[in-house]
Image (cartoon, rainbow, N blue to C red):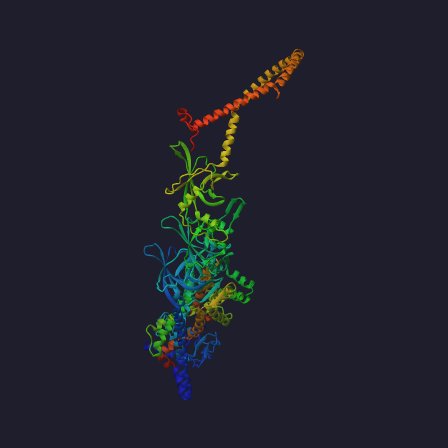
């Protein structure tokens, strides 16, 4: 295998559980042990999808100021932004917090379900390529931190009540971190086990 | 996948099999690079191919095989400059306009930080300052260093530069923090008459800075840092 | 990778296999939990959803789909779901999603909905909070059995909401005055209620107002309670001076209604929707009812200056009615102008005034007309008198004038004509006028001229008399003395002649005696002739005939 950071060539090592191979020259991670990942990922992905639905259908936070209430969902905030003329920013926010993570989850499900049965899904290559390119653009955890900052800023002037979506987002962040952190290269090897056998 | 390709691949693996910590050539104390060995790894499916021509389709996934990211230096420069240009309005223009019974207040990123600091939320002030001011600055300067050095094939502190790149990739997304904060605040505080927050033009510029720097770091090929020997330089000339 | 693991599994103890089996199923717990949570949340929302109703309003001003709340007693019971224009564009249809526990009273047919916006009306400024929070929809639960999901929204908040306890009453008035919806109702100067609504009567002859009195003050409204306009200022210029009465500053601005019972005898509590009359002021309200009225017509043959409609008709100090109208009439027969005055008299006032020490007047067995005729026979007349020397106002006084000549009263004609009498003061006035004119007529100048002339002649006479007297003294007096001596001698001799025992006298006496005897005998004769007139012819019968 070739290091992506410095182009050095290495032999693919046998990895035990939780073992990670690193390039000695530049320190880039080369491979990690897949372990039971493929069994874990699918249920987590499904759970993430459900949490996604909750996180977007329910209001994130609700504020109350002298009897006046106001609440918003993620989509609601995006709509407000685009209504103010900031359509590009609205699209950016929507994409990074809704579209891209959702796409990643859906692709995972699309790919993993047949894989669990030992078959390769249609458009596997294309799907995984998309998955890989979307990886840096899912920013749900940044969004969560942003929600926290905004909540703290508002709590100074109004009463802030956490909505159902907020907890969903917290759980979603945790799950997504696990789900998205897997190594897609492993999927390739899973999908094409013939090469593995040949390598071994 | 054709049998010849496969055969080539297997041969490569067998011939140059080495454990990660044992380089193939002990000549310079450096492991052999794939470029030197004539190997190309598919960027999508990480399959390694022997003597595959530049631009050939990967047998496993169909992606175009390239030794280095195409036009990496130029693209990175362009994106970097654009991001740097957008950085000024992002910090000078107001990102958030607060309308309340007491009047209208326009906040830039820095004035928001000052507000937090003055009202006692030191942690928040530090956080916003880091995420919205320092990080983009750091990204811009880091990218600048990386690209400039890679362009000049400088061997100066390559390992550190590699680490720098890894760091960039990790923290790149976190500067989106302020964008999300403004988006949420303007969606939430919409009580006519009492208080109303709207997003200012600055946030669009700021979003642009984040996106551009992310794109810039994605377009930069970190392997260029290591292409310091003449052999690689030649290859670089063909690819850049 | 799989091979390795399987390899390990084959070499190691079976527990590893079991452990591997658990983990996947444990992992699946996570999505299951997530799904359960999601379903619970959705179910909770659907469960709390109550019925959906549609309200029609004139305008959707201040209302926002998805945001505007429906509140009852400031508790949110629903949210506006959708706002749509009606098909004929005449009104706005607002779909509201009510909460489940609100379904009870708020879908009843008589539930009411209105939009609370900042309002300025007679009861003051209301709904200011909505300037900041945006308008909301107020609701009032209904009690009807029938349910419906279409309501016509009110444009203004109702004065009386169902949760207010108290009673409504109906007032009848001539006009609304300065009252309006929301005008306060006072009892002993405390605001206890307000006017809920008013409308013109069908025949246009009056106004019916509906008044709401809050509990617990509604128990002070009894069957005897009187209501009156307490609007503005009540200024009266009377014998005691100027009286200024007002209920409160609010009534000066907004108008108001007050109520009280005469002598605080409320009587039993008035039932809901009892009807009362609205008097113009407190005195009018507290007046006892006048009972049946009688119209009287009086002809005055003098100036009615100072008399105006509304002037009191007074009987010996008790006001029993008022003047209705004054006119002018020319009587062709007598060729003079008469002033007919129509007055309304309330005999009950007299009767009331005659109640002494609680003895109630008994029902009379005479009719009104008979009584009137009797009284007129006794001398009841109408007379104009000056009531107020300052303003010259006059009033009609009824009193007994027994010296008047009786007048025939026709009680059949309507209005009954009451005979009138000139005002005594007027008589004196005319007499004095006569005297004055007579005195005027006396020609004082001529008399004085005559007198002067007389004085002059008298003066001359006196001077002549003086001269005469002087002559007399000188010439005439001695002769007079001699004449007087002679006269005295004559008188003495006459006296001697005429003395008692003088021979003249004796002769005279004798003569007289004889005359007397002769007269006496003649008298006997005449008597006899009277008794026996035939004796002239037959002579005297012989006396010897003895009866």
The extreme top residue here reads C475
Evaluate whether residue C315 shows in this view.
yes
On screen, residue C24 above or below B95: below
The x, y position of residue C330, in whole percent, is: 39, 33
Q: Is residue B170 found left or right of C457 in the rendered image?
A: left
Residue A198 location (% of width, % of height): 36, 81
- Number of numbered discs overlaid on the protein picture: 0
- Position of the C terminus of chain C, as image quadrant, is top left
Between B118 and C500, the one lying in front of the other is C500
Relative depth, front residue between C355 and C263 = C355
**Quadrant where the N terminus of chain C lies?**
bottom left
- Image spot of residue C33 (x, y percent): 41, 76
Residue C535 in the image: state x and y as whole percent: 41, 26
Given residues A84 and C7, the one toward you in this image is A84
Task: Look at the image and tell me whether residue B240 can be seen.
Answer: no
Q: Residue at x 34, y 79 (%)?
A: A118
């Amino acid at each position: 295998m070739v290091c992506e950071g410095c182009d050095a060539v290495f032999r693919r090592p046998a990895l035990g559980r939780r073992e990670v191979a690193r390039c000695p020259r530049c320190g880039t991670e080369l491979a990690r042990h897949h372990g039971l990942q493929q069994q874990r990922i699918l249920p987590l992905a499904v759970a993430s999808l459900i949490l996604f639905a909750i996180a977007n259908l329910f209001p994130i936070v609700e504020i109350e100021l002298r009897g006046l209430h106001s609440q918003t969902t993620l989509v609601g905030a995006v709509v407000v932004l685009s209504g103010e003329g900031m359509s590009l920013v609205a699209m950016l926010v929507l994409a990074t917090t809704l579209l891209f993570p959702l796409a990643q989850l859906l692709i995972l499900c699309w790919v993993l379900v047949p894989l669990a049965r030992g078959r390769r899904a249609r458009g596997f290559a294309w799907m995984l390529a998309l998955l890989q390119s979307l990886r840096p653009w899912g920013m749900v955890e940044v969004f969560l931190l942003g929600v926290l900052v905004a909540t703290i800023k508002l709590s100074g002037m109004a009463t802030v009540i956490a909505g159902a979506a907020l907890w969903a987002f917290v759980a979603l962040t945790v799950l997504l971190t696990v789900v998205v952190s897997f190594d897609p290269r492993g999927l390739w090897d899973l999908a094409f086990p013939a090469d593995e056998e040949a390598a071994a | 996948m054709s049998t010849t390709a496969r055969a080539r691949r297997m041969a490569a693996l067998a011939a140059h099999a080495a454990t990660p910590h044992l380089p193939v050539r002990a000549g310079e104390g450096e492991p052999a690079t794939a470029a030197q060995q004539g190997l190309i790894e598919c960027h999508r499916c990480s399959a390694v191919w022997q003597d595959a021509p530049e631009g050939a389709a990967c047998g496993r996934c169909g992606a175009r095989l390239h030794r280095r990211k195409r036009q990496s230096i130029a693209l990175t420069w362009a994106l970097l400059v654009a991001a740097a240009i957008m950085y000024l309005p992002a910090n000078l223009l107001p990102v958030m306009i607060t309308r309340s019974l007491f009047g209208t207040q326009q906040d830039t990123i820095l004035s928001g930080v000052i507000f937090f600091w003055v009202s006692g939320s030191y942690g928040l002030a530090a956080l916003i300052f880091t995420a919205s001011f320092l990080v983009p600055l750091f990204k811009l300067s880091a990218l600048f260093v990386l690209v400039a050095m890679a362009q000049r094939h400088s061997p100066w502190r390559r390992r550190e530069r590699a680490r720098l790149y890894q760091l960039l990739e990790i923290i790149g997304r976190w500067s989106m923090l302020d964008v999300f904060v403004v988006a949420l605040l303007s969606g939430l505080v919409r009580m006519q008459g009492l208080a109303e927050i709207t997003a200012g033009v600055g946030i669009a510029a700021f979003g642009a800075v984040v996106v551009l720097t992310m794109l810039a770091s994605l377009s930069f090929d970190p392997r260029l840092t290591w292409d310091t020997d003449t052999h690689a330089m030649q290859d670089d000339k063909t690819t850049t | 990778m799989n091979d390795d693991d399987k390899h390990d599994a084959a070499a190691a103890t079976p527990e590893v296999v079991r452990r591997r089996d658990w983990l996947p199923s444990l992992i699946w717990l996570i999505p299951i939990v997530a799904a359960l949570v999601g379903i619970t949340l959705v179910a909770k929302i659907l469960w709390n959803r109550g019925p959906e109703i549609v309200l029609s309003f004139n305008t959707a001003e201040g209302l926002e789909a998805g945001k505007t709340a429906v509140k009852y007693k400031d508790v949110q019971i629903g949210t506006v779901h959708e706002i749509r224009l009606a098909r004929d564009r005449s009104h706005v249809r607002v779909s509201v999603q009510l909460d489940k526990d609100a379904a009870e009273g708020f879908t009843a047919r008589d539930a009411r909905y209105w939009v609370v916006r900042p309002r300025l009306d007679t009861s003051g400024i209301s709904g200011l909070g909505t300037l900041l929070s945006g308008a909301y929809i107020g609701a009032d639960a209904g009690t009807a059995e029938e349910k419906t999901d279409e309501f016509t929204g009110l444009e203004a908040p109702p004065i009386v909401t169902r949760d207010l306890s108290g009673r409504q009453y109906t007032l009848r008035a001539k006009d609304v005055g300065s009252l309006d919806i929301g005008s306060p109702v006072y009892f002993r100067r405390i605001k206890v209620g307000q006017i809920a609504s008013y409308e013109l009567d069908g025949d246009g002859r009056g106004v019916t107002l509906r008044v709401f009195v809050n509990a617990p003050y509604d128990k002070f409204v009894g069957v005897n309670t009187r209501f009156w306009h307490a609007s503005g200022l009540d200024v009266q210029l009377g014998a005691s001076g100027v009286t200024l009465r007002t209920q409160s500053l609010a009534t000066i601005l907004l108008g108001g209604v007050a109520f009280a019972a005469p002598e605080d005898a409320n009587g039993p509590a008035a039932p809901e929707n009892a009807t009362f009359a609205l008097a113009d002021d407190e005195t009018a309200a507290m007046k006892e009812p006048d009972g049946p009225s009688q119209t009287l017509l009086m002809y005055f043959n003098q100036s009615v200056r100072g008399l105006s409609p509304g002037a009191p008709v007074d009987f010996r100090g008790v006001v029993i009615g008022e003047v209705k109208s004054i006119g002018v009439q020319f009587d062709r027969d007598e060729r003079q102008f008469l002033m007919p005055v129509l007055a309304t008299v309330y005999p009950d006032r007299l009767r009331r005034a005659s109640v002494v020490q609680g003895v109630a007047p008994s029902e009379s067995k005479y009719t009104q007309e008979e009584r009137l005729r009797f009284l007129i026979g006794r001398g009841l007349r109408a007379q104009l008198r000056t009531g107020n020397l300052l303003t010259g106002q006059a009033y009609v006084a009824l009193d007994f004038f027994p010296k008047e000549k009786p007048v025939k009263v026709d009680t059949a004609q309507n209005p009954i004509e009451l005979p009138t009498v000139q005002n005594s003061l007027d008589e004196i006035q005319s007499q004095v006028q006569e005297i004055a004119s007579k005195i005027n007529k006396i020609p004082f100048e001529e008399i004085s001229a005559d007198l002067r002339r007389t004085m002059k002649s008298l003066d001359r006479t006196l001077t002549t008399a003086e001269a005469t007297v002087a002559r007399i003294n000188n010439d005439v007096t001695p002769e007079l003395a001699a004449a007087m001596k002679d006269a005295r001698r004559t008188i003495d001799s006459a006296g001697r002649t005429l003395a008692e025992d003088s021979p003249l006298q004796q002769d005279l006496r004798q003569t007289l005696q004889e005359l007397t005897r002769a007269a006496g005998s003649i008298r006997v004769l005449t008597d006899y002739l009277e008794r026996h007139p035939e004796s002239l012819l037959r002579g005297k019968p012989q006396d010897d005939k003895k009866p």
